[in-house]
Amino acid sequence: MRHRSRSVNRIGTFIGYEWWADMSHESRVVYTYPYSFVMSQIDDIKNGLGRQNPCSQIHQYSSAFPVFYPKGWDTVRERWVQYQDDDFWRAVTNLPFPSLPSVNYTEALAKLYADAAGSMPLSANLVVNAVEFASVKTLIPQACQIARKILKAGLKRKSLKEMANGHLLYSFGVAPLITDIKAILNVRQNVKKRIAELQRRSNRTVRLSSRTGQTVSNLPDSWVFAPSSSARRLECEGEWRIQSSGCVSADVTSFFVSDASSQMKLWSSALGLSSPLSSIWELIPFSFVADWLLPIGAQFERVESKLKMHETVRSHSLSNFTYSHKHICWIDAQGTNVSTAVPSWNGLRFNVPTVFFTAYNRSQGIPENSWEPAPSGWSLKRTALSVSLLIQKKL
C-alpha cells in the first residue's frame, strides 16, 4: 500500500476592536493563526499491474474566506465590538465533503462485451432509412408550406404552432436524413477499418476500455462555521454540482478470421440488418419519448447482444477486469450568521468562496450494476423537442 497526503498551510489574521459602553476607551487585538487542511490524498495498492492498480485519490481546494463584522453591542460582555477575519476557513475542521452518487456501468459493460465479441457499430439502419427516404418527396413541400404560414401569420399563436412543426420536421426529418446519407457513404470504410482492427487483435491479448456517459447531479448540503460561538456561528447552505463518469477495462484475447461469414455479419451489423428488434422499435412513432423515461431501445440492444447476433470473432475471453469512477464537484454557498451575543450581527449574510473537489477511485473486478439501463439525462435539446411536441398537440 502506498499512501501520500499533501496539505495546504495557511496563516490567517484576526483583528478585533472593543470599546467600553461610553466609547471612552478603545482596545485593539491582532493575532495570527496557522492552520492547514488536506489538499490531496492518494492510496495506491502496488501489485505490478500499472494502471490496473486499485487506488483512490481526492483533491480539494478553496480560496480564502474573509468576513467582516461591523460595530455592534455585545450583550454578554457588555461592550462594543467589531471583528475582521481574513480567512474564516480556520473555523471548520476540513473543507466540505460531498456525498458522491453511484455510477451506472450497465451500458459501459455491454459495450465492452460487444467490442470484445467483434461486433460492428451501427453506421446506418437500412430498414429505417428506407422508410425515411420514402418521405423525402413530401419533406421539401412541407417545409415550404410551414415557412409560408409563418411569414403570413406573423408572431401569433398560429405561427407558434407552425414554428413547433418546423422544429420537429427539421429534428426528425431533415437532420437525420443528412446524417444517414453521410453514414451510408462511409459504411464501406468503417467495415474495412473494423476488419483491420479485429485482425490486429487476433491471437493477442489487448486491453480494452469502455466509458460510461457523463451524468450531472445536484446535491444540497449544509455545514456550520464556529459552531460553539455565541457571536459568530455561521450556518451555511449550498448545492453541490457533481459531474460523474466511469470506465470499465479488461484484458481481451480473441481469434478472428476474415472470411465470408464474418464479413457478412459485419456488413449486416453496420446496416442494421441484424438488429430487427431495435429497427422495429425505432419505426414506432414517438418511441424516442418512451426512451426518455424507460430505455426500452437499449434493452432491445441488450437482447440482441445476448443472442450473439453481432458476434464475429471465432472465440474470445475477458480477464483482469477493473472499473473506475471520477467525480468533479463544486459548490457555491451562502452563510447566515446566528448570534445571541450580538443581536445586530444576527442574520448577516456572507458569500462563501467556491469549493472545488475531485475524487477518483479504481478497483479490480466487475462492477455491480442493475439489469435495467439508467434513463439518459435531460438536455437543452430534449427540452426544446418536448416544448415543440406540447405546442403541436395543444395549440
Image (cartoon, grey):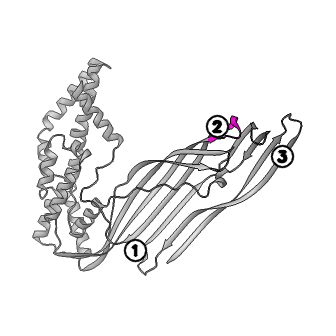
Describe the element under mark 1 as helix, strand or loop: helix
Residue plotted at (31% across, 69% down):
366
Question: In this figure, which residue is indicated by the disc labeled 3?
Answer: 28
Q: Residue furthest front?
A: 76
- On screen, 236 above or below 156? below
Q: Nearer the viewer, residue 175 or 72?
A: 72
Q: Nearer the viewer, residue 262 or 211?
A: 211
Under mark 1, the amino acid is: Gln
Which of the two discs, 1 and 3, labels the residue nearer the N terminus? 3
Tell me residue 338's x, y (percent). 63, 41
Percent position of residue 27, x then y = 85, 44
Instruction: Give the structural element (helix, strand or loop) at label 3.
Output: strand
Location of mark 1 (residue)? 52
Q: Find the distance from the CA under tag 2 to the CA under tag 3.
A: 23 Å
- Residue at horizontal 30%, vertical 33%? 387
Drawn side of residue 169 relative to residue 47, left or right: left
Taking the magenta stretch, the answer to whether it contains residue 352 is no
Which of the two discs, 2 and 1, labels the residue nearer the N terminus? Answer: 1
Q: From the viewer's perspective, tell me whether residue 268 is left or right of residue 148.
A: left
* Residue ID for mark 2: 348
Q: Amino acid at mark 2?
A: Leu
Tell me the residue at 75%/52% (across/down).
Answer: 13
When asked about the image quadrant of residue 344, the answer is: top right
Task: For marks 2 and 1, give the CA distance.
Answer: 50 Å
Residue 28 in picture, x, y percent from top left: 83, 46
Q: Could you tell me residue 234's position as x and y percent? A: 62, 45
Which residue is the extreme one toward the right? 24
Q: Is residue 262 above or below residue 48?
A: above
Q: Quadrant of the C terminus?
A: top left
Query: Label 3 is placed on what type of residue?
Result: Arg
Q: Residues within 10 Å of mark 3 (few under 14, many from 20)?
A: few
Residue range of the region highlighted in magenta in the rendering: 337-347
